[in-house]
Image (cartoon, helix red, strand yellow):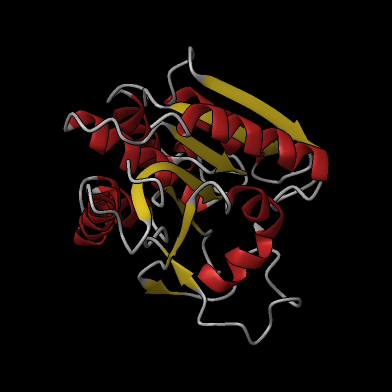
């Protein structure tokens, strides 16, 4: 790799936010990574209202975006079965992961950081690439990640047969082999989904860090330094 070229990390925001908001939310981690990696913040393709915790701090910071239509099990399952939205995002990752990278001085993508919905999108992107024999993604970092089809349950915990079938099908496609760091908020309302998302990754390469907080990026300086060190150790050897 050329001396002036830095490997890339892609950041995938949560539902109901956007890249600019995610830059603010990840500022502590990004500050520790920016000298070693080129950071790319991608925009989801669909409009929606502000996501959980976005208002009032980010009022007027729209448009607010989402990766998929998850208003029903059927709509979300279309995304996981290779919708045009997912395929376009996959092609975007491939372009950034090419030998020339995504911009001047940017090398191939070696890690994905995904918050909430972005966490499960990062998981499936990595699995698809691995299925095609592409192992450039060395680490996935789901932060307060959610699970395809909500782990088979509706809001409130009622079992949904359509969601459960689809969720089991996706889980049954095999684990992601890339290393992973799962950041899970102890008071996150979506913590059960974050815990389940761990199972989508190979147990030999996954690390779980539970932090004091809810559905947000962790703000603790020591924790961010720990995560940055782990990412650097896994990804900076290419």
Q: Quadrant of the C terminus?
A: top left
Specify whether residue 181 is in view: no
Q: Residue at the spot x=53%, y=39% of the render?
A: 141
Front one among 167 and 211: 211
| Occupied quadrant, residue 202 | top left
Specify whether residue 95 is in view: yes
Where residue 155 appears, as percent x and y from the top left, is 57, 49
Where residue 227 appears, as percent x and y from the top left, is 66, 36
Q: Residue at the spot x=57%, y=37% of the render?
A: 193
Front one among 207 and 53: 207
Above or below residue 234? Residue 58 is below
Q: Residue at the spot x=75%, y=78% of the render?
A: 56
Q: Residue at the spot x=56%, y=34% of the render?
A: 232
Q: How many numbered markers are drawn? A: 0
| Occupied quadrant, residue 47 | bottom left
Where residue 198 appears, as percent x and y from the top left, is 53, 27
Q: Quadrant of the N terminus?
A: top left
Above or below residue 140? Residue 121 is below
238 on left or right of 225:
left
Above or below residue 100? Residue 196 is above
Where residue 151 appears, as percent x and y from the top left, is 48, 36
68 on left or right of 48:
left
| Occupied quadrant, residue 224 | top right
178 on left or right of 219:
left
Spot the residue most to the left. Answer: 132
Spot the residue most to the front. Answer: 3
């Amino acid at each position: 790799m050329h001396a002036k070229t830095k490997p890339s990390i892609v950041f995938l925001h949560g539902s109901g936010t956007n890249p600019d908001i995610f830059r603010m939310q990840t500022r502590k981690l990004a500050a520790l990574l920016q000298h070693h990696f080129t950071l790319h913040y991608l925009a989801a393709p669909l409009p929606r209202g502000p996501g959980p915790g976005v208002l009032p701090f980010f009022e007027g910071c729209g448009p607010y975006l989402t990766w998929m239509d998850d208003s029903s099990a059927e709509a979300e399952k279309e995304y996981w079965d290779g919708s045009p939205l997912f395929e376009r995002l996959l092609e975007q990752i491939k372009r950034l992961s090419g030998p020339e990278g995504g911009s001047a001085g940017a090398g191939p993508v070696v890690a994905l950081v995904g918050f909430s919905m972005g966490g499960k999108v990062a998981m499936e992107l990595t699995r698809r690439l691995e299925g095609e024999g592409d192992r450039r993604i060395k680490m996935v970092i789901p932060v307060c990640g959610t699970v395809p089809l909500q782990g088979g349950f509706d809001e409130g915990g009622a079992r949904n047969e359509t969601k459960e079938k689809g969720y089991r099908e996706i889980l049954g496609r095999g684990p992601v082999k890339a290393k992973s760091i799962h950041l899970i908020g102890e008071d996150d309302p979506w913590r059960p989904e974050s815990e389940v998302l761990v199972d989508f990754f190979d147990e030999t390469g996954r690390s779980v860090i539970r932090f004091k907080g809810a559905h947000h990026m962790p703000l603790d300086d020591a924790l961010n330094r720990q995560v940055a060190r782990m990412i650097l150790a896994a990804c900076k050897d290419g």
